[in-house]
Amino acid sequence: MILPRPLFCIFGALIICVAHVATAVEEAVDNFLQVPADQITATTRETAMPDLGEGKLAKIIQRYYEEGLGGKSVWEQISSLKLVGTLKLESGEYELKAYQKKPNLIKLIIRGDQRDMVLGYDGEVAWRKLPGRNVKAEPMSEVEGRRFIHNGFFGSHLLYPFALGKTIEYIDTVPTDGNICHQIRVTLATDYQVDYYIDIRSHLAIKSVSTDLLNNVVNSVVYRDYEREAGMPLAKQVESYEEGEWRSSLRIEEVKVNSGVIPWMFRMPR
């Protein structure tokens, strides 16, 4: 039997369509981490830089771990950071001292006109102490605390990739602030979505864009002037924006790694 030419065209188009769908499916799968669920243990979920398996996204994140964060051995040796710098806001210029301790403890002391404002999170309570001699520390509001905890995460949300409620996806390779970057999206159980822009050559984070999925407020942070501290790259110039409008600039002038930062330092004063 000889098939009519139009039927050949239909079959040809169908073959092309099937091939296109197959390619699209393969690319879609490659955009996510491909470790089978039955291989993800409780220990894996609690590991900052676990084995990521094969695939495009796994290779990008692995290079980021190695080049952008210093690698597994360096990360494991760092338990805390103390940063001193100058913070510029619309209201003026302030001295900033920041203390961070794994996994998520943070304390900021912002000094201006010889008065301190202190913000902290001890792993359970996010709190603040406003300037004033007789002002007592108090818990932050739920909204303020949620945002403070999210922004104060030690390192990067690309760490602990198999944590419960977290998904990581390759989005695209795009130009960003004069660099060509991989855009990697992290969706968190806390209803935040963070897009990281990882330079394809240096594998450093050039920018992060955080979207609060509860109210669609978008905050972005631009990282510049990286220097290595104890083997870990650290941006010394950090610019932050909200809905595209500049909010702050931070110039880090001093860094101390593992400088005796201990948990009680982060507790809310009574």
Image (spheres, rainbow, N blue to C red):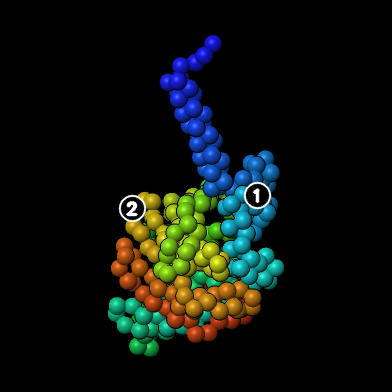
Q: Residues within 10 Å of mark 1 (few under 14, many from 20)?
A: few
Q: Secondary structure at mark 1?
A: loop
Residue type at mark 1? Glu
Quadrant housing the N terminus: top right
Question: Residue 11 placed where, x, y %?
Answer: 49, 24
Q: Which residue is mark 2?
A: 215
Mark 1 or mark 2, earlier in chain:
1
Compare residues 133 and 260 and report the one nearer the observer.
260
Q: Residue at x 29, y 77 (%)?
A: 90
Question: Residue 78 placed where, x, y %?
Answer: 64, 72
In screen coordinates, is 43 left or right of 93?
right
In whole angstroms, how far apart are the C-alphas of marks 1 and 2? 35 Å
Disc sitting over residue 258 in the figure: none
Compare residues 198 and 129 and report the one nearer the observer.
198
Q: Residue at x 67, y 65 (%)?
A: 72
Q: Residue at x 51, y 63 (%)?
A: 198
Please identify the residue farthest to the top as the structure is shown.
Answer: 1
Q: Quadrant of residue 51?
A: bottom right
Q: Secondary structure at mark 2?
A: loop
Q: Which residue is mark 1?
A: 54
Compare residues 76 and 98 and report the one nearer the observer.
76
In screen coordinates, is 210 left or right of 170?
left
Q: Residue at x 51, y 65 (%)?
A: 199
Q: Are marks 1 and 2 in contact (CB under 8 Å)?
A: no
Q: Quadrant of residue 176?
A: bottom left
Please identify the residue farthest to the bottom as the structure is shown.
Answer: 114
The residue mark sitting in front, 1 or 2, is: 1
